[in-house]
Amino acid sequence: MIRLESARVEIQNVEVLRQFSLELKPGTMVGLIGRNGAGKTSVMRTIMGHLKLLGGQLRFGDTDLAALAPHQRAALGIGYMPEDRGLVPELTVEENICLPLWVSPSLPLQERLAFVYGVLPELVAMKSRKAMLLSGGQQKLVAMARALSVGTKVLLLDEPFEGVAPALSQRLSEVVGGLRGSGLSVLISQSDLNHSQSLLDAEVVIERGGNL
């Protein structure tokens, strides 16, 4: 589904990915494991087009992802949950969930919203609240919901269990586990395997921007 081969990426002339390779096969869950600063977020941002690929290849099936603008990747069915949540504070919960749908007209908005609320029913009661009024844990749920809204084929979850209470971490694990068998391909980055080892089909370890 997604194939990153020999990727080279720089941030302000510092090489953050060094010939790094990763494959996410259809319908599988893969863990991207590494210490803080190892390059996990750089991998996610490269796949989403937020960082430029300087060398190597990035493909989504037969499509050259590196040639597409970031918003076009959402339209392909790729959902992204960034580590910092990336919500717009002044928008409501539902508006934040709808953001990627607004630039993906091929996806039926109401149908995708119904799917998201079915997976995360606790968000229904807060859908009209502004994101700035939510707790950090609630914001994580909204970020997950936003990724799910357009992630019809692939989900990229960057440190979904980091910095949240144990109960919420368990809830997020349940949501991810519930996606098994749905046909989605899921890439989960984290610094350890405490929360998701039982969910994963494979693990890829990254160290200093390269494969270990």
Image (cartoon, grey):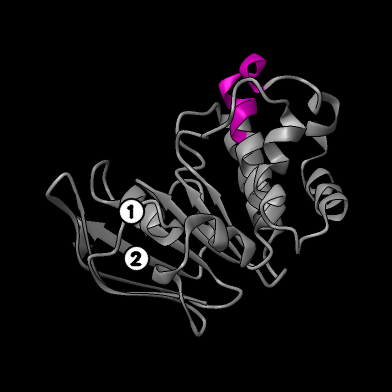
At a point 51% along the width and 64% down the height, the residue shown is: 200
Which tag, 2 or 1, sits closer to the chain's start?
A: 1
Q: Residue 88 is drawn in which quadrant?
A: top right
Is label 2 in contact with label 1 (beta carbons under 8 Å)?
no
At a point 56% along the width and 23% down the height, the residue shown is: 136
User: Which residue, as the protein is rendered here, is positioned at the far top?
Assistant: 133
Residue linked to disc 2 = 204
Residue linked to disc 1 = 51
At a point 67% along the width and 42% down the height, the residue shown is: 99
The answer to whether residue 207 is above or below residue 27 is: above
Whole-percent x, y for residue 116 in the image: 78, 47
The answer to whether residue 31 is above or below residue 135 is: below
Considering the image in quadrants, where does the C terminus appear?
bottom left
Seen from the viewer's position, the closer of residues 178 and 101 is 101
Residue numbers of the magenta segment: 131-140
Main secondary structure found in the magenta portion? helix
